[in-house]
Amino acid sequence: MSRSDNLETAAGQRKSGRLAGETGLIGALAEVFGPPPRAVVLGIGDDCAAVSLKEVKGNLLWTVDTLVEGVHFSLAYTTLTQLGWKAMAVNLSDIAAMGGEPLYALLSLGWPPERDLALELAQGLAQAAREYGVAIIGGDTVASPGQVAVTITLTGVAPPRRMLRRAGARVGDLIYLTGELGEAAAGLLVLKRRPELDADLQAALVAAHLAPKPQLAAGRLLAGQGLAAAAIDTSDGVASDLYHLCLASGVGAAIPAAAVPISPRVLAAAPYLRADPLRLALMGGEDYQLLFTSPPRKAVRLHQAFAGVGLPPPLLLGEIVAGDRVLLIDAAGAVDISGAGYDHFHLDPENEAI
Amino acid sequence: MSRSDNLETAAGQRKSGRLAGETGLIGALAEVFGPPPRAVVLGIGDDCAAVSLKEVKGNLLWTVDTLVEGVHFSLAYTTLTQLGWKAMAVNLSDIAAMGGEPLYALLSLGWPPERDLALELAQGLAQAAREYGVAIIGGDTVASPGQVAVTITLTGVAPPRRMLRRAGARVGDLIYLTGELGEAAAGLLVLKRRPELDADLQAALVAAHLAPKPQLAAGRLLAGQGLAAAAIDTSDGVASDLYHLCLASGVGAAIPAAAVPISPRVLAAAPYLRADPLRLALMGGEDYQLLFTSPPRKAVRLHQAFAGVGLPPPLLLGEIVAGDRVLLIDAAGAVDISGAGYDHFHLDPENEAI
């Protein structure tokens, strides 16, 4: 391993803010990330990472997400190891939403010069990478005086004809989720409000917020067996994510309020959190489930396929309808929640900081 | 174009710092970047960008660089359009250093919520992308309260057998540069110190700092004709970059001080900048030239090849020698400058902010 770097120091960094022991840091990061697989022609240690394409069949997927301290996370609530896991997981979730297989990641790490312990962050990245078969093969480190910023670029492959997209939902499709909603948002409230709540329940909600599990197996299954017409991951909140899917597909959606698959943990914790569980479920975001549509005639095959690989059954959320709005239906009528975010609902005065 | 986004809003952004008019911003950015080429299956508007690999032959190259406000640039010295150009150019330079062709870019833009005018930055990115044949096909935007941060991930392809690497230099190789040194560092001093200097000279130096030109044509030529044994781009400064090349190759280097190809503009400006031109040239960095080695028996062919495609002749810097140090040779003897950065030399008290 060269002490130089792809994990490269951006030019100029040393001029006002070289990371303490940065050359050593890069070597140490590379050690944590481990040796790359055979198809990686050049990993950490040159101007670029280089990968042989010979064994890659399909479309190359490509996604990038940045988590910024004070915006996406607070180091008062998350350890660096947890942050590393989550930074990788949110990108893996984008690959899952295409029905893809993750391949390689680049890290771009903005790091306050006075701060230690980037290796803990690397441990978390490496854990998630190992768990989901990703090789971290390069990147750069830069001084970031104000805040920690973790950017992961992730590639993957998807079967060209069966790749999942946001576009493709048709009127009459059923809308499903790979898991229950609201735990991640409730977990953040637990961290912020420290409610008087059962310890196991707290731990489960906090884990949902800090250590989301990208739904790669479900995405692979949906794409591989042609079971989904359209798909997206639930990152911003279902009201917003489903609206994105509807926009891309040129359709609307109807959600019966009574049928929203709210996590029982969220229902149990909501009173202690002074939060509306339905709103946590639909506008809370960060659950990183897959939200997908599928025609009713495939319902049995869909459930069989999930059961066949040991996945929990898909949960029904609603139905694709004509129009261009996402409507929440309850006894009082229909409410347009198209693109609604958490703050839109003014849950309570502390809400701005959820 | 979907109003949703690959140029995706990272989850949580809206929770404390949605970009003003961010949905509109993404659409507007996408418009500035223009429609993607045919091989792009999905551009801006889904969870990932997706690219067909059918027509890509060779190794896939992959690089990422982040420019952070206050570390790599000051908005007192650069316009957003210039910043956009530079953010793309520094990544293109990494592709050039492999002898590659750039293909696709993702933007991850950290943007202070209260700030306008991300479109000017996009214009600069788009200018550089057009100039060098890159398609910007996705990314994300996140609120970054402290500072502007621009992360570009760039892919390219390189011929598998002839890809340029840092490793490969051999004792006896000659060391060359694709252009003169020191202008970018001198340009930064011009911006900071506002010296009494000829206006044309100032403008040329400032342009070298703000609008570097990645040496893609030279890289392509060196790789395609097998004319370089090892290569790197000069981002951190020759003393540091050459040391990285030597480390990767397991060799040392000797540079005759009298032969360093210092830009005449730097020689002319140095007294007004209170700077040592040799130090600007060797430790200043950001010239984004290619530094490469080539065996002496190829010297004629090398010069013919450069002349044949209209490139200025390669400039001799020194020679690869046994050992593991980068030595600067002058009448007084040899000075070890291995990995030396600008601050290492304590040029003057203002230096820390160069």
Image: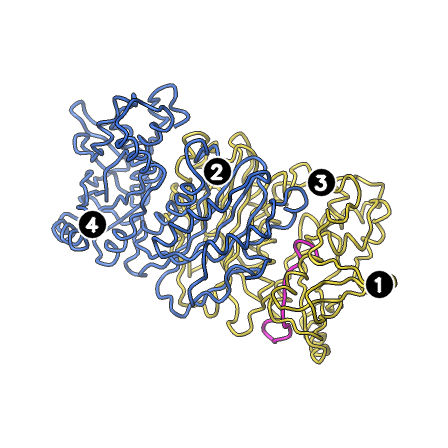
Chain colours: A blue, B yellow
Q: Chain of mark 2?
A: A
Q: Is residue B92 left or right of residue B311?
A: left
Q: Secondary structure at mark 2?
A: strand
- Give the amino acid at mark 3: Ala
**What separation in Å lies between label 2 and label 4 (alpha carbons)?**
33 Å
Q: Is residue B212 positioned above or below B20 on the image?
A: below
Residue designated by label 3: B353
From the top left corner, tell me how far across and down residue B266 is, in percent: 81, 53
Q: Quadrant of residue A100?
A: bottom left
From the top left corner, tell me how far across and down residue B224 is, in percent: 58, 73
Residue designated by label 4: A311
Pointer 2 and pointer 3 on the same chain: no
User: Residue at the location (82% across, 50% down)?
Assistant: B276
Verify CB contact (< 8 Å) between mark 3 and mark 1. Answer: no
Q: Secondary structure at mark 3?
A: helix
- Give the amino acid at mark 1: Gly
Which stretch is magenta? B223-238
Disc number placed over residue B333 in the picture, else none = 1
Q: Quadrant of residue A253?
A: top left
Badge 2 crowding class, 10 Å Cα cut-off, few under 14, some 14 to 19, many 20 or more, is: many
Using the image as rendered, state which of residue B27 and residue B289 is in the foreground.
B289
**What separation in Å lies between label 3 and label 1 (alpha carbons)?**
31 Å
Residue positioned most to the bottom: B297
Badge 4 crowding class, 10 Å Cα cut-off, few under 14, some 14 to 19, many 20 or more, is: some
User: Residue at the location (61% across, 71% down)?
Assistant: B168
Disc number placed over residue A68 in the picture, else none = 2
**What separation in Å lies between label 2 and label 3 (alpha carbons)?**
25 Å
**What separation in Å lies between label 1 and label 2 (alpha carbons)?**
49 Å
Q: Is residue A181 left or right of residue A77?
A: left
Q: Chain of mark 4?
A: A
